[in-house]
Image (tube, grey):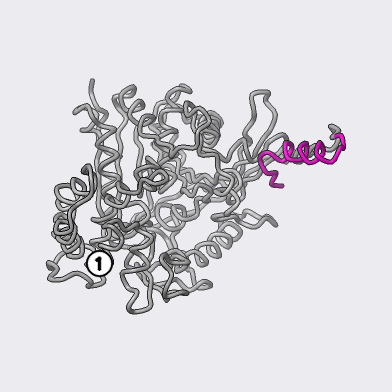
Amino acid sequence: MRRAAGAAALLLALALSSGNVVHADDAPAPAPIVLAHSVITHHVVHLANGEALAYTATAGTLTLRNDHNDPTANVFYVAYTTGDRQRPVTFLYNGGPGSASLWLHIGAFGPRRIVTSSTSPIPPAGGRLVDNPSTLLDTSDLVFIDPVGTGYSTLTGKGADKDFWGVDEDIRAFSQFIRRWVAANDRGGSPKFLLGESYGTFRSAGLADRLQNDGMSINGVILLSSLLDYADDFGNPGDENVPDAFAIPSEAAVAWYHKKVPDPPGDVQTFIDAARRFTNDEYLPAILRAGPLDAQAQAHLAQRLHAFIGLDPEYLQRANLRVSPARFEGELLRAEGQIVGRYDGRFAGSAMDRNSDEPEFDPSYEAVAPAFITSFTAYAKTELNWHTDQLYRALPGDVVNSWNFRRRGFFGRVLAPSVIPDLREAMHVNPNLRVFAANGLFDLATPFYTTEYELANVGLDPAVRARITLGYYPSGHMIYLNDDALHTLRADLARFYAAPPVSR
């Protein structure tokens, strides 16, 4: 069903080069129109306080349409509701770009959750679902959404991948889905929250502003493991200084965990605070100064950096004091023939190539992904009564590989996009919009120091800054894999939802 963006143009170019004429009949045919449908089931979840909460689960698809009202996609979702149409409703999704929502769904906040063990792999066929005492359902109705091309969401009618696989295209599609779902379910009077993880936070920041412009205000945005500016997280070509620097406090936490730093303090938080000060007061001023450091200053800074991230000082000098997170993941445990995880630096795996600069895989992702996918597809069939012959697309590579990262106003140039201006505008326009950002201390994919820097640029006005809250957890990128971290996060979110509206 996938039709690659630009396929028609490529067909025309090939035809012209061969002297052939392309006829309209040769163009890709529209996808068959499949009608949206849903399945309703009724359940009970037992909460942490011992209470039983009855709820309705609706697994279904919602049809998106283009400007001519033609169907373009059927978006798969699962909604958990309790019957009170004035309750808050939260829209949840993961990142990628191109990830389905199963991770947040059965890993974190849905009424059923897969049993995890923090830093131990889950047996691929051994995923077990139990009632989730940390579900958000006792606080808010929940709608989990799979972006087009992921999960069970598919094109239909005149839809094409290029209509959905891009920064602004994705935001536009999610805005339409949320507005259609709210209208169809008579939830206009409900407080509305967005909860995204990783690239889902990027989506949320742009989506809050887009929904505001489309006539719908959002009460709160919850960012899990934030990615808000690609330049800060990944850098532009030839400019890796800032992303490498922002990762140092997270790398320090990982090096502390693996006992690779000299004379570490007894608790990781003390060490992280010192790494923050080092990064801000010593490292960044040194590498951003005009001109190179002299030999003595470079050797001193290498020793100082070694004290925090554990890598050999001579290696750090050869690297010109600039080590990307990926190279750190490959270097920290090289002597043991191991690599550390990108999503969670506490995980370690055997290196496929002990001389490789960067790991060939992420042991923290591979430790859990098969069990999540197997468990969710079984759950959808047996408990949600969703029967299909489709394969569930959890994190398909074709989506991110085809993603359009160009944003409006970039004049066609390929630049690292940002949604910080979107979030800044949304928070200034809507004085009741609040933001909660949750961060895993051992997350090397989206380091917490980057989030601190980026959100400081959102809340320049003190009144705006006061509506931004940050939380920190002893976890990796997927905070909820750690039971204790999830329970703490859930308590923090309860306070976030309960906060009264901000008075003007």
Query: In which quadrant will I find the C terminus?
Result: top left
Q: Is residue 87 visible?
A: no
Going by the image, does 253 lie left or right of 421?
left
Q: Position of residue 194 (x, y in %)?
A: 41, 38
Q: Position of residue 43 (x, y in %)?
A: 50, 53
Q: Is residue 176 magenta?
A: no
Q: Is residue 54 above or below residue 125?
A: above
Q: Position of residue 164 (x, y in %)?
A: 59, 38
Within 10 Å of disc 1 (Cα), the crowding (few <14, some 14-19, many 20+) is many
Q: Is residue 227 above or below residue 130?
A: above
**Quadrant of residue 24 within the rendered picture:** top right
Q: Is residue 13 magenta?
A: yes
Q: How many marks?
A: 1
Residues rendered magenta in the picture: 1-21
Q: Which residue is rendered at x = 31% and y = 58% of the image?
A: 323
Q: Circle 1 is placed at which residue position?
A: 255
**Quadrant of residue 387 within the rendered picture:** bottom right
**Quadrant of residue 455 within the rendered picture:** top left
Q: Which residue is rendered at x = 66% and y = 42% of the image?
A: 37
Going by the image, does 371 lie left or right of 327?
right
- At label 1, the amino acid type is Ala
Going by the image, does 229 lie left or right of 102?
left
Residue lying at the far bottom in this picture: please name it: 336
For the residue pair 289 and 104, the one nearer the viewer reads as: 289
For the residue pair 379 and 67, the one nearer the viewer reads as: 67
Q: Position of residue 343 (x, y in %)?
A: 39, 59
Q: Is residue 15 visible?
A: yes
For the residue pair 235 and 69, the one nearer the viewer reads as: 235
What secondary structure is marked by label 1? helix
